[in-house]
Amino acid sequence: MQPVEAHLTPTLRHYLPDPFHLKDMDRAAARLSKAIMGAETIAVFGDYDVDGATSAALMKRFIEAAGGRAILYVPDRIDEGYGPNTAALLKLREEGARVVVTVDCGTSAFDPLAAAATAGLDVVVVDHHKAEHHLPQAVAVVNPNRVDETSPHGHLAAVGVAFLVTVATNRALRESGWYLQDRTAPDPMQWLDLVALGTICDMVPLTGVNRAMVTQGLKVMARRGNAGLNALAEVAGMQERPDAWHLGFLLGPRVNAGGRVGQADLGARLLSTHDPEEALTLARLLDGHNHDRQEIEGQVLLAVMEQIEEQAKTPMIFVAGRQWHPGVIGIVAGRLKERYNRPACVFAVDGDVAKGSGRSVPGIDLGAAVLAARAEGLLEAGGGHAMAAGFTVRLENLLAFRDFLVEHLLTTDVSEVTPTLRLEGAMEPAGATLSLVQSLRQLGPFGSGNPEPRFALANVRVVRPEVVGMGHVRCMLVGTTGSRLKAIAFRSADSDLGYALLANNGTLMHVAGTLHHDVWQGRNEVQLFIEDAAYAR
């Protein structure tokens, strides 16, 4: 397949690797197939984010479709924290589980997995996070980012790894003759909608096999076969054929909301149910939690802004507060990073411990900084990657941690890191046609590694700006020829961009953003999602 053709029409036939190229895949498939054929209860231990929820739902759906028994467990973000814990694993053992599959977690759970082994649990780890040189005690650790792994697919999300595990286990069951006994072998391709959702929301590069899985997954999602996704699309008001934007900005935040401010397992339960009524009930709960999350996030952001004034010239933003909800601090850190173009760390303080989340800018490896601080003994726990990290620190070490980051690890002058907005071209509002949007869509799915084409509209007038929804600014752009284009700047009402749009009195502006198909009350139109604007000079 030629490069252009492979990019525009990526196929799994071309990109999907043999799952058995991953280390321990043979051991994972053998143990899971044995458990399914032996009617052993398999506990799927997930994570509370979208990648974790989709991974858990995918694994549970496969096990049950193959004729096995599966139960679901997702730890509470606040009470239990990330990953397997000993108490939860022993409880699963008491409830009859003989095998535990950890998805999107487990690679660094050394003590809990050792306790599980002692209790007689066989654990299969399915993960994608960076691993240390030694591995936990488990039957298998399937992780393309193991130190000893030679796979070129370290960019897979956890749900992508889980998909490969289902393909491998399905093959093992078929070779064992399991499907010759009046059983129909399930087709894992039917769950690519879950793979697409988790892959997009975990912001892994949409290249190679990821791009192929997401492309096919969007087609599967369009058939509305998953009761949970169908209900979620309904409560989100999603009328159009799904694309990456819908998954990342409409569906994903709602799946995440349960883990952030509600009940941690709601997302995984929604995505794994076959009952439309149960799905609608869960989707409405998650939609409500998402509204709660937005309100809580706004409250924390207001409190944070009171501290920001004192940090106008610091190389990074470092804020902490009591009674800040730990479920939203990562989102708030991301908002601060975007607004100030500096690394941002936000901490929720509880007693003498602060749990924090950080977001960075290109050129500054926050994950490496956190690992270095952990090696210095400043953190109780911590890890991440270049652009995002999480950490737990005792209150007495909080300022020392801040000073360590600023003085020893932020070697790049943040003031010299200039934010850039790449533009593919310029146009008049009249050029933003439905046919153009449809043509651009062929370049998708868009996301990390495949950014959406962005255009500038020069010398346009902003007409009828107004605040709508949760702080969005909606307006009409009028070009020099009088042509018009609907536009919206999401969550911008309290930002410099929003202030400029709302205060505009007809002054000419240059506006940049991405073009989208907008379906509203039966009308098909084009709308610009505004990302930036400047006064024309």
Image: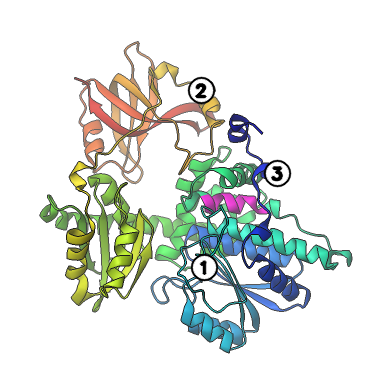
Q: Residue at x 31, y 76 (%)?
A: 380
Q: Which residue is mark 3?
A: 13
Q: Nearer the viewer, residue 187 or 18?
A: 18
Q: Nearer the viewer, residue 343 or 506?
A: 343
Q: Nearer the viewer, mark 2 or mark 3?
A: 3
Res. 89 image quadrant: bottom right
Residues at marks 1 and 2, CA–CA distance in whole angstroms: 41 Å
Residue type, mark 2 in image: Leu
For the N terminus, give its image quadrant. top right
Q: Which residue is mark 1?
A: 265
Residue 500 image offset from top left, x and y in percent:
22, 32
Q: Which residue is mark 2?
A: 436
Q: Secondary structure at mark 3?
A: helix
Badge 1 density bin: few <14, some 14–19, many ≥20, Cα 10 Å: many
Q: Residue at x 50, y 48 (%)?
A: 200
Look at the image and give the residue range highlighted in magenta: 191-199
